[in-house]
Amino acid sequence: MPHERLVVIGGVAAGMSAASSFKRLKPEAEAVVLEKDHFISYGACSLPYYISDDVKDVNMLLSLTPKVATEERGITVLTRHEAMAIDPSKKTVTARNLDYGEEIIFAYDRLVMATGGLPVRPPLPGIDLDHVFTLRTLDDGIQIKKFIDQWTSFEPCVGPQCVYVNPFGTQKRPMRAVVVGGGYIGMEMCESLRKRGLEVTVFEKMDRVLGNMDISITAIVEEKIAAEGVVLMKGVSVEGFESDGDTLSRVITDKGPFDADMVLLVIGARPNTSLAVAAGMELGAAGAIKVDEYLRTSIPDVYAAGDCAEATQLVTGKKVYIPLGTTANKQGRIAGENAAGLNNAFEGIVGTAVTKIFDLEVARTGLSPLEAEREGIDHFVSTITGRSRSSAYPEGKPITVTYVVERGSGRLLGAQMAGAEGVAHRIDTLAAGLYNRMTIADIARLDLAYAPPFATVWDPILVAANVALKTLQRGT
Amino acid sequence: MPHERLVVIGGVAAGMSAASSFKRLKPEAEAVVLEKDHFISYGACSLPYYISDDVKDVNMLLSLTPKVATEERGITVLTRHEAMAIDPSKKTVTARNLDYGEEIIFAYDRLVMATGGLPVRPPLPGIDLDHVFTLRTLDDGIQIKKFIDQWTSFEPCVGPQCVYVNPFGTQKRPMRAVVVGGGYIGMEMCESLRKRGLEVTVFEKMDRVLGNMDISITAIVEEKIAAEGVVLMKGVSVEGFESDGDTLSRVITDKGPFDADMVLLVIGARPNTSLAVAAGMELGAAGAIKVDEYLRTSIPDVYAAGDCAEATQLVTGKKVYIPLGTTANKQGRIAGENAAGLNNAFEGIVGTAVTKIFDLEVARTGLSPLEAEREGIDHFVSTITGRSRSSAYPEGKPITVTYVVERGSGRLLGAQMAGAEGVAHRIDTLAAGLYNRMTIADIARLDLAYAPPFATVWDPILVAANVALKTLQRGT
């Protein structure tokens, strides 16, 4: 091997970030990316908008093609190459070309694990039936869209009298979709599927959607999806899927069967670690690959980044598994830099996320009330509803702000928000607050921007802090 | 005097906040507010939207009426009462009832100065002509709107052939407005006046609008107002105003005369301190009333808050005069609390502001490049243009982000932004950064929210930090 070589397993967010930052620092070295899928470096978070047809061209989701990665960044990208085994003693990765079947052994000086996450897919009866989908990869998204396109390529059926022929025979009704799981992706997909004219029912096992969020926020989300015609069934366990022929006919639940033409199973993600485990890497939080602050795994010269790896929650200082694209990009970049010889730390995350659910913005950062409870932190929850614009300015909308606050110290532990506008970026101010371990008294002192079209003179962030401060001072 | 009494001079943002927080803490004490105008507690920042007719009813601008202040908060509000003199040795304020002329002497235990700001109004020839307006108070806004209403209550004249009669005679043209001063209010009023169908020309003495902001931002603003039909004339000094009859006919500048039907003089505000000076109060930054962190003036038992008072710029630790509604509300509340016996500090501001200029959001926080230079801080300026949404998601808009960074330490000194969406609240994250004295390396580590409709996976805030970090590391 004439040059130093980095091998990266996985070519989506973390993997391509790692290869790119490595090559920026060491242009003379080789960076080989093994990706078992057809695509690299795509925006998985945009899949709901591709399925909804807001994004028409699948190429829009690709931030980088293998050709561009090779020509402009000098990265060797091998798609349809699945890494089969790692030999840490020999420092090799064995990969299989999925189109031709041959195996290739790559020697590495440094290795980055960017194997991503896998959809949770419990071994329920009928789970492998056609039209039971998960949504994780671009290929998943393409399949779902293709399926909906087939059905809806006919004039949508409007009114009770309509009869039209769809690919599955004469139908008097739109396609019936069941979304299993009321998490972020499930909620985003409600919008996508409704936009395509589907009937949508959500089965959620817990007592609320977005189970990790406070009920002050989830109640708003549930009201919104109901207003958009989504049927939510809470406290329902899915037990299997049945077919009258080749394809799905109904979902079996603990409350009885439910007719459906398609199922979207979005009940979470788990780290894809089989390769890491076989190679002897230690696992950490939630079974993700254990990493130190430099993103080094327990095996020398092997780094891990993205949805296969753990990260430190800065609020608690503990390792967590929160797979998000933002973290994958940051970790990937730093893993690549460190593989190239730098010594950059990835301090961690605070767990900031935002989602659009129809015209509602829902966001969170830090600990939820449930997480604070699990951590055994003595805390209280404080909620206010403010407005997105000055009361004088037309068309302001309510914004609900919930803080999780440590008793005694008054330290902000987490924040959640919902509203039709002004939520997506307001949460970032609180993310910065968490990063700096601010108390709600500190938050109340922030000098935030005001103009009537954008805020009230006391921004909802400040109102929420002042109200929480009163609770803190009462000591109740 | 049976009870303890607070007297507050000025009943807008700071004054009413002070009286309200005082009464919350001391319901048994008396709070008397003296306001020389007709209105109290109005949203002066909303005046451009009242004049534009986005806000139709002037009552929408009133957050509190004297009646409600009295009945619900127990505050004695005396409008049309002008404070004429303070006697600190006797602890009295002499006020005049402007409707009936009588003078009343109020004894006080504590006094809050909330006399606000005054528009800068240089003694130019003709400045007192009719139709030369300033915009500071609600009365100013009402007069301007009334004047425009008169003219535009006729069908707007469209096309060169139109002839219609307006109150000033037969006209073939819309009203011509000259805005003197390209600051925030001048820019906001461009939108208001264009919405009302006026021809708008801005005279700005400096080489750019929003003189304190970086040219990377002001160039975007200038392009926007030009696209909206506003004529901007830079490097022009206004020397006076002339009339052919009773009312304004033209503006005299160092570049020659310019025909105009109305002038809006918005070249800044200065603290209203004549009463304070006469009473012997010390002045501080920019001639504002000097206050300590508890908002105490140099005279015992006298506090000052809002546009008449100075504040500490937390970035430099120095006293500044930046009159803004947000600060007035916060200072007012704390002055009232301290007047009631608490000991709350007002730490200061970072100078955060946002404005809407047509469909452009423009925001700033911290020091501008010019301010950093004046402070003698070795700094560099770094600008990027990112996007408001993921490239896959439809209708994203450019966002320009400019950081002012201290060389060596990498500390963020200030930030400015412009863009069609996502600016107004993004600036707050950087305001929190300044409050916590974050470096750009810290900023680059922030865990910010991402979803395709709201941001790119590397938020413009992070991209800007990473780019600035490279400049810092190069040490150039």
Image (tube, coloured by chain):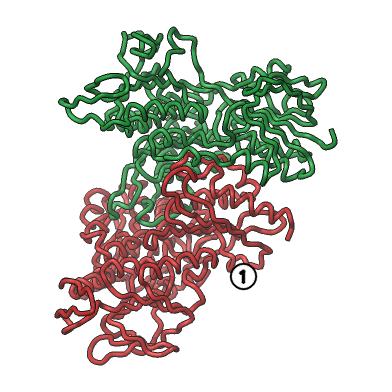
Chain colours: A green, B red
Q: Is residue A198 above or below residue A42?
A: above
Q: Quadrant of the N terminus of chain A?
A: top right
In the rendered image, residue A128, in percent from the top left (x then y), is placed at 46, 13
Residue closer to the observer: B471 or A339: A339
Q: Quadrant of residue B401?
A: bottom right
In the rendered image, residue B10, in percent from the top left (x then y), is placed at 33, 64
In the rendered image, residue B47, in percent from the top left (x then y), is placed at 30, 64
In the rendered image, residue A7, in percent from the top left (x then y), is placed at 73, 31
Residue closer to the observer: B136 or B378: B378
Q: Is residue A137 above or below residue B109?
A: above
Q: Quadrant of residue B274?
A: bottom left
Q: Which residue is mark 1?
A: B374
The amino acid type, in three-letter code, at marker 1 is Arg
Residue closer to the observer: B257 or A122: A122
Q: Quick check: B165 left or right of A428?
A: left
Q: Taking the image as drawn, is residue A318 in sight?
A: no
Which residue occupies 24% across, 20% down? A170
Q: Quadrant of residue B370?
A: bottom right
Tag 1, which secondary structure?
A: helix
Q: Is residue B112 above or below residue A377?
A: below
Outermost right residue: A2
Which residue occupies 16% across, 84% down? B169
Q: For mark 1, name the chain.
A: B
Residue closer to the observer: B406 or A22: A22
Q: Quick check: B66 left or right of A112?
A: left
Q: Is residue A192 above or below residue A175?
A: below
Q: Quadrant of the C terminus of chain A?
A: top left
Q: Taking the image as drawn, is residue A259 in sight?
A: yes
Outermost bottom residue: B244
Which residue occupies 23% across, 29% down? A157
- Badge 1: how crowded within 10 Å, few (<14), some, or many (20+)? few
Q: How many numbered discs, if any? A: 1
